[in-house]
Amino acid sequence: MQPQVSSTQRTTTPRKTRPSRPGSPGHVANSVVITPTTHAPTIAVGGALARPATVTLGRVMWPYVIGVGSYHLLALLAFVPWCFSWTGVASALLGLYVFGTLGINLCFHRLLTHRSFECPRWLEHGLSLLGVCCMQDSPARWVIAHRIHHQHSDEQPDPHSPLVNFLWGHMGWLFFENHATTSVGACDRYARDILRDPFYRRLDRKMFWLWVNVIQAGLFYLAGFAIGSLWTRTLIGGMQFGTSLLVWGVFVRTVAVWHITWSVNSLTHIFGYRTYETGENSRNNWFVALISNGEGWHNNHHADQRSAAHGHQWWEIDITYLTIRMLMLVGLAHNCVRPNERLLDGASVSTAPADLVVD
Ligand SMILES: [Zn+2]
Ligand SMILES: [Zn+2]
């Protein structure tokens, strides 16, 4: 067992308190446990929280500003009739699941960040490429920001707490350099397990993840061009159909997935109900759960971070978890971390959150 990154722990207080996890999956052996720090358990909604001290407002992340801005502008091409096709719309809707749910929720979040289950390495890499196609930075960078968020939720130095202000928590935090998430030390502290894999190091190095997105856009256009030109027997027909797949299947879908993911950071730390008193401001939000296929049960997730299931009640539908169950059924996922039974029963047990695990 390697040393703990932080020896202090967040204190949970009733409504329900967090019990220690009964048993743990085999892969937590030889692990570093990043535990949340202690702070006041009650935070008023809208309470002023300063931006992380590690953020330099003078250092604008121009590649992010230009990337996010240009994708939003390109997505507006959806309002141009020439760029429309029903196949394009269908590819955007299907893409919300394929890239957003499988790539971000299932892979970046539940698999890579929280190690909620295990799967064959080829499948993990494939799923991570789907996540990369969402333009949310490399897997390692995504994991670093999210692990810091769990360790310091709604307090310094949470990189994206909406208690600073809504816009900051939603997307503003992306546009300014934050030394806490970009330093070499952050990589070692929060993503050592990820970057041990040469595949993820390659994606991280020289921003190769960005080139994956360029290739993705090219494939969407070329596939549409080939089908459209064959179907209409004209070049212009191919260009029109290829453009519709590019605009809807890539630009509109990427922007939609962005705002869905960002809503988990912003809306579910402001609006919704709290099942567990977790010592920060996380909420269960049905609207975000609906559009994100399960990520909106965020208070449950903060209370039981390693659980693959974020829905704790029968009505808290979690499509992402159902997908993991399907993978288990066909033998492609195993060692799935189940919801903590004692937590579900509302047991009052003192906390011992061994939640964020870095192998
Ligand atoms: Zn999480
Ligand atoms: Zn959160």
Image (cartoon, rainbow, N blue to C red):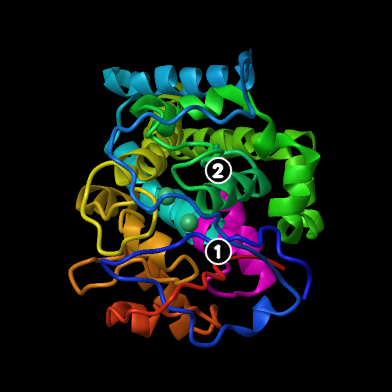
* Gap between marks 2 and 1 measured at Cα: 20 Å
Amino acid under disc 2: Cys
Q: Secondary structure at mark 1?
A: loop
Q: Nearer the viewer, residue 174 or 254?
A: 174
- Mark 2 or mark 1: which is in front? 1
Question: Nearer the N terminus, badge 2 or badge 1?
Answer: 1
Q: Which residue appears farthest toward the bottom when viewing the image? A: 23
Q: Nearer the viewer, residue 74 or 319?
A: 319
Q: How many marks?
A: 2
* Image x and y of residue 263, in percent: 35, 40
Q: Secondary structure at mark 2?
A: loop
Q: Nearer the viewer, residue 277 or 256?
A: 277
Query: Taking the image as drawn, is residue 79 in sight?
Result: yes
Q: Residues within 10 Å of mark 1 (few under 14, many from 20)?
A: many
Amino acid under disc 1: His
Where, quadrant-wise, is the N terminus in this rendering?
A: bottom right
* Image x and y of residue 18, in percent: 40, 72
In the image, is 286 to the left or to the right of 126?
left
Residue at x 58% of width, y 52% of height: 147
Residue range in magenta is 109-131
In the image, is 114 to the left or to the right of 310?
right
Residue at x 39% of width, y 55% of height: 279
Residue that mark 1 sits on: 114
Q: Can you tell me whether the CB of the residue at mark 1 lies under 8 Å from the nearest atom of ligand 1?
A: yes
Q: Which mark is residue 133?
A: 2
In the depicted structure, whether residue 24 falls above or below residue 165:
below
Q: Residues within 10 Å of mark 2 (few under 14, many from 20)?
A: many
